[in-house]
Amino acid sequence: MTDRTDGHWYDDAAGPVVRPYAMTRGRTRGGAEGRLDRTAFVIALRSVGGTDTHLGPEHIGIAELTAPRPRSVAELTDLLELPPGVVRVLVGDLLEAGVVRIDRPIPPAELPEESVLRLVIAGLRAL
């Protein structure tokens, strides 16, 4: 049995430390696993309310952080000081509850070439 007074399970400033798997109820994968890498942007669609009783304080924190502006999974990981896997599971919960949506940045390979954009600009100026 682990002694909880040895400093490993207790933080003087925060009190007892909650293990990350407790926040995710032991899950390591969320509902949006394939869509959530570190560059995915999380955007709040609504606030967390009384009908969202299955969501915890970490979920509420993510919803509040993404309400004023979109934030990447990497940024949420840093702001919440949680492991990336935990943030992905929590964001997946919020996605399934309809609280947030996910936007992915456009990969550089899918952006139009500069020459195409210059042709479009020239065509618009000709109008």
Image (cartoon, helix red, strand yellow):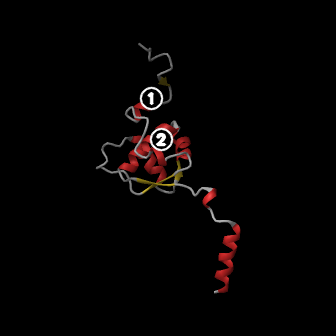
| Quarter containing the C terminus | bottom right
For badge 2, the amino acid type reads Val
The residue under the point 51% across, 55% down is 70
Q: Which mark is residue 19?
A: 1
Q: Is 58 or 38 nearer to us in this picture? A: 38
Badge 1: residue crowd in 10 Å (few <14, some 14–19, many ≥20): few
Compared to residue 114, the image places residue 105 above or below, namely above
Q: Earlier in the sequence, mark 1 or mark 2?
A: 1
Q: What is the count of numbered marks? A: 2
The residue under the point 47% across, 42% down is 88
Judged from the image, the secondary structure of the residue bearing numbered disc 2 is helix
Could you tell me residue 110's position as x and y percent? 60, 60
Q: Is 83 or 103 nearer to us in this picture? A: 103
Q: Residue furthest top?
A: 1
Q: Which mark is residue 1?
A: none
Could you tell me residue 46's position as x and y percent? 39, 56
In whole angstroms, how far apart are the C-alphas of marks 1 and 2? 13 Å
Quarter of image, res 21? top left
Compared to residue 73, the image places residue 113 above or below, namely below
What residue did someone put label 2 on? 87
Q: Residue furthest bottom?
A: 127
Which label lies toward us, 1 or 2? 2
Could you tell me residue 58's position as x and y percent? 42, 41
Judged from the image, the secondary structure of the residue bearing numbered disc 1 is loop
Q: Residue furthest left?
A: 51
Apparent side of residue 118 relative to residue 47 in the rendered image (left or right): right
| Quarter containing the N terminus | top left
For badge 1, the amino acid type reads Arg
